[in-house]
Image: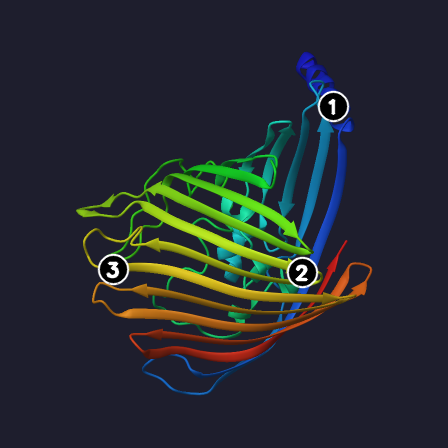
Amino acid sequence: MKKTIILSILASVFAYVNIAKADISLSGYAEWIAGSVDQPTADSATNHGIDMSGIDNGTYTRLTAGYSSTLDSGLEVSGTMTISPRDCLGDRQDNCDVVNHNFVTISGGFGAISIGERFAAGAAMLSRLTASGPTAEPDGANMQYFYTQGDGTYGATNETNYASNDMKILYTSNVYSGFSFAVSYSDFTGSHGSLADLNAQQASASTAASWADYSDLLSVFGKYAMEMDGVGVELVYGQLTGNAGRDITTDYNDLSETAYSVLLTYGNFAADYRKNDAGDSGRPKNDGSGNNEGTSICGTYTMGNLGLGACSIDSTFTNSSNQTNENKMITYNAEYQLGGGMSFSATYFDHEQTENSVVETDADGILTRLAIGF
């Protein structure tokens, strides 16, 4: 017993000495949201006034620990662990995959390799002013807690596996004369770093629903960036493939998706166009459904502590009856940096969802956010 205790102490001391060699950092972010929405239409059968308002904790409050060190071989090693105080409870369950990260990155002359819970190659390469613009809306989707959305399938506004922290291996290259590329691999998109998530298990799909989790999902993206006379251009194109499966007697289409973006910058102005097209991926084979596409067009402008932005997103989906569902949202954003890591921002949005030309959601409102990073 004493020998075990001594060995444990020695192991702890050894671990501490090695950790002490690494540079360790601790940072955090907290946000508080207030919103008010006017929603005259909640679904096709009901047209009644819904006015929801209130204060919310926000989605992305978190604490992040980071470390970095240099190995004897000269390779750089860095890692990140992020903890959310919401701990994926209640109405934040769908955001677990976004805010909880635990991954390590090894970088050198060959580029960088990351292993663990992290974003995929698309997030590393595609321009996404829907997320990186002022207030991070509409990508942040904090508006959704202040109104009721339709329950139909309206198409995806981002590529498959975006903002999901299933276990991945990600490789990003160095930049060669403006060219770079990234490749990510996930053996099962339903695995989120827990032993309870069995790797490569198949998730079933309800009748006529899309396949939930792909196995062997491979994302490959290339980027070319250049600047001429003060005008910056970034062109990104990528493909995603993955295996679906069978639910009882129904076979589902494997994932075959393309995504691309164009980003233009000039001084303090930026504008981008992004499109993702998954076609009939994940749908029951030969049922006629598909045309799962999404596009976004955004523009941002910054001057001093003030940032302004506007985005339009549109996604469509065709069901097995050849009826088209559509999702449209327009946002106007403003954000002011107060100093000391604190900012105040506001977003006005207009959101409409239709199923076969029947309005399921018609909502417009304003969202305000007080945020601080430390």
The residue to which callout 2 is attached is: 266
- For label 3, the crowd category at 10 Å Cα-Cα, with few meaning under 14, some 14 to 19 and many 20 or more, is many
Residue 18 bears which disc, if any?
Answer: 1
Q: Are marks 1 and 2 in contact (CB under 8 Å)?
A: no
Given the current orientation, which residue lies at the most extreme front position? 229
User: Can you tell which of label 1 and label 2 is closer to the viewer?
Assistant: 2
Picture quarter containing residue 279? Answer: bottom left
Mark 2 residue type: Tyr
Residue at position x 47%, y 52% from top?
Answer: 260
Quick one: label 1 or label 3, which is nearer the N terminus?
A: 1
The residue to which callout 3 is attached is: 289
- Relative to 310, residue 267 above or below: above
Q: Are marks 3 and 2 in contact (CB under 8 Å)?
A: no
Q: For this rendering, which residue is in front, 240 or 230?
A: 230
Residue 333 drawn at (x, y percent): 63, 71
Judged left or right of residue 141, residue 287 is left
Mark 3 residue type: Ser
User: Can you tell which of label 3 and label 2 is closer to the viewer?
Assistant: 2
Residue 359 drawn at (x, y percent): 36, 79
Residue 329 drawn at (x, y percent): 48, 72
Residue at position x 56%, y 54% from top?
Answer: 127
